[in-house]
Image: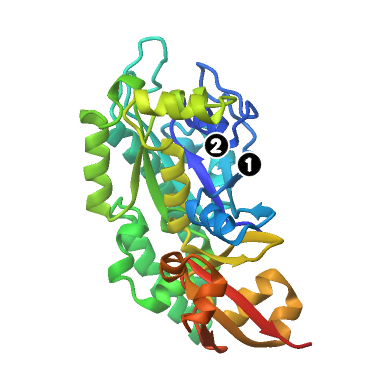
Amino acid sequence: MALSVGIVGLPNVGKSTLFNALLQSAKAAAANYPFCTIEPNVGTVEVPDKRLYEIARLEKSKKITPTFIEFVDIAGLVRNASKGEGLGNQFLAHIREVDAIAMVLRCFEDPNVVHVEGFVDPIRDAQIIDLELIAKDLETVKKRFEKVEKMARLGDKKAKEELEWLEFLNSSLESMEPLRRHVRKMPPEVLEYALRNLFLLTLKPLMYVANVSEKDLPEGNALSKKVFEYAKEEGAPAVLVCAKLEEEFIGLEKEEKEELLKSYGLEEPGLNKLIRSAYELLGLITFFTAGEKEARAWTVKRGTKAPQAAGKIHSDFERGFIAAEVINYEDYIRVGSMGKAKELGMVRLEGKEYEIKDGDIVYFRFNV
C-alpha cells in the first residue's frame, strides 16, 4: 500500500486548487464556499528527481520510470469539528487514514474569497486545526482509558502498565499541545504503544504549506514568514507555494512553463519542493536501477536493508539475495557511467546488513 499525505486546512485556503495542480488535472473541485470537497480525492504524484533523468541520459536508457507518492485532498475543517461542526468526525476519520499531514495555511488577502473566521491569520488557523485534532485524540485516549481501567481493577498487570501510558498521553494532550511536540520527552515504550495501537492524529508527521498570492513570489510575505517561524519552533518543515500560479501551469508546454517561472523569479514550481518535503516527511528515500532498457527510481523507508530493497523489485530478489553492487549517485556522476565506475573499482559489493542510502544506484545479485 502506498504511503499517503493528507492535504488539510480550513475551507477556502487553496487545498483543492493545490491538489488540482499536483495532479495536473481538474479532478478536485475548487469553489468559493465551505465544504466544496466532501469525499476525499486521492491522487498519485510523481516525485520530481533530476537524478533519475541524468542517470537515464548517461546510461542511454530507453525507458524512464519515476517513483510516486500519494496525496489525499481532505474536506475543509472548521472550529468545533470534533463536536460535529461542519463535516466533523467524517473529516477527522479521513485524517486518521493518511500517514502524514500537509497543513495548508492561507497567507493571501482576497476580498472575493471568504474566510470562515472572518479575516486571514495563518497561525490562528493552524491552532484551530491542532485543537480539533487534540480534542479527537483526547476522546480516543479517554475511551481506551475507561476500558483498560476496568481490566486493571481486576488485577491485570499489562492493563496497569497500559493505564500509566494512557495517563501520560492524556496529561500531554490536556496541555492543549499536539503530541508531536511531546515526542522528545515521551518514553519510547509509550510512543511505540501510541503509534501501534491508538493511531493518534497529533502524532502524525506534519508539514506546513504557506499559500501566497502571485504578487508575493518568490520571497513570500509577512504572513508566510510567520508560518515559517512557527514551523521552525516546532521543528517541522515548511514550504512556500502559490496554488493559483501552480494551477496555471496545467497544460503548459515545457518552454512556456519555464518562461512563466522565470517571470516570477522561480527556479522550479513550488509543488516540486512540496512533493519532495512530503516524501522526506514520510521517512522515504530513493534508490535507482539503471541499464539500457530502463532507468527506474524505487522508494523505500530510510533504514531499509539491501535484501528488503531488492524485494521491492521482485520477491525472488529478496528470497535469493546474494549481494548488492552499489555506487552512490554523487560518485557515479563524477565518472559518468556504470561501465567506467566498474573499471575504476568504484562499485562496492554490499551484503545483507547494508542499509540502502538515498541516491544509491544498485544492481542486485540473487539466486533462486
Badge count:
2
Q: Is residue 308 visible?
A: yes
Indicate left or right for 328 with 24 as reference.
Answer: left
Q: Evaluate if marks 2 and 1 touch, with contact meaning CB atoms under 8 Å apart.
A: yes
Q: Is residue 202 above or below residue 288?
A: above
Q: Is residue 146 visible?
A: no
Q: Residue shown at 27%/39% (left/top)?
A: 227
Q: Amino acid at mark 1?
A: Gly
Judge by depth and name the residue closer to the eye, 175 or 66. Answer: 66
Write down the residue under mark 1: 43
Percent coordinates x, y for residue 198 in the rendering: 52, 63
Q: CA distance from mark 2 to mark 1?
A: 8 Å
Front label number (2 vs 1): 2
Secondary element at tag 2: helix
Q: Amino acid at mark 2?
A: Leu
Q: Which residue is mark 2?
A: 22
Which residue occupies the extreme right position in the image? Answer: 368
